[in-house]
Amino acid sequence: MSEETRERVKRVAGEIEFRPNALARGLLSKRSFTIGLLTNDTYGRFTLPVMAGVSEALLDHGVSVFLCAIEDDPALGQIHVEAMLDKQVDGIIATGKRLDKRLPVDLSNLPVPVVYAFTEGALNSVTFRSDDAHGARLAVEWLRQSGRQKIVHVTGPQEFFSVRERAEAYQQVAGTAEAVMYGVWSESWGHDAVEKIWSQAGEKPDALFCGNDQIARGAVDALRERGIKVPQDVSVVGFDNWEIVAAQTRPPLTTVDMELKELGRQAGLTVLALAEGRPVEPGVRKLPCRLVVRQSCGGHTPER
């Protein structure tokens, strides 16, 4: 039908408060117009922006999304998967709290399509993840372009794949001779790392590239306690763009955004395509990151 006719039908439907019968619609199309989102990220740091992207992508297609949190419990995970299948979801999106760990439930050989976002996917699956190496290069190159000469990388546990990927990219830009300080994902580690660097003899850095925003915030606090000005003396860049941390750091924190909402949007459109029977090539899709520049490295420069 023409766009004019479509709008007229919608207007009349609204006037008479007509509501389509979703059950009847599902019986005719053999679809439930629902997608299940399965996660072990119960804190929601990574899952909530992914879910926002999924919901935004599917809203115009009349598809609803419901979230099931399974923590790290395989039995609970299986219960939720069975419940999703009983509700005849059109597909499942699996997401988590790190790139190199699978959810504690087997999602292979299900009768509905499964797409993975920010978690390790099954063999021959479609997986979306942030390009951590790209994000690290954005941060270090920005510091270099800002005139910083000695950049130290303070990051999380070395066993994390994302940590190793970011560290390798950092050394490619800063130089392979530059050491990486591995630790934990916490403000206290950022604070301790600064104390360790400034208690040792030798040249001090004029920039810190931190593995996440919590580490960066701890580092900024430790520098301030030592009377070292950020960004005049030392620039600091974080990773994650966790607004509640980055925006409240003093000064506000320059950081790398992993574009998790876009990650969710792409995953949502892909699982919809699979549910509709359209062909989708399996494999890992890396989405570029974005540098959000705030005052901790010296300016109000627009986002990149």
Image: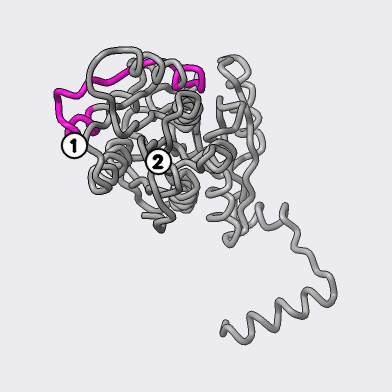
User: Which quadrant does the C terminus fall into?
Assistant: bottom left
Residue 97 coordinates in the image, percent (x, y):
49, 27
- Whether residue 263 appears in this view of the structure is yes
Give the residues drawn in magenta, as a range: 168-190
Residue 237 coordinates in the image, percent (x, y):
39, 37
In the picture as drawn, the residue positioned furthest to the right comes out as 16
User: Which quadrant does the N terminus fall into?
Assistant: bottom right
Q: Is residue 153 above or below residue 66?
A: above
**Residue visible at 38% across and 44% down?**
297
Display coloring: one colour
Residue 174: in magenta span: yes
Q: Which residue is mark 1?
A: 173
Q: Determine the secondary structure under disc 1.
A: helix
Residue 299 coordinates in the image, percent (x, y):
41, 52
Residue 56 coordinates in the image, percent (x, y):
57, 55
Q: Determine the secondary structure under disc 2.
A: loop
Q: CA distance from mark 1 to mark 2?
A: 21 Å
Q: Nearer the viewer, residue 172 or 225?
A: 225
Q: Which residue is mark 2?
A: 231
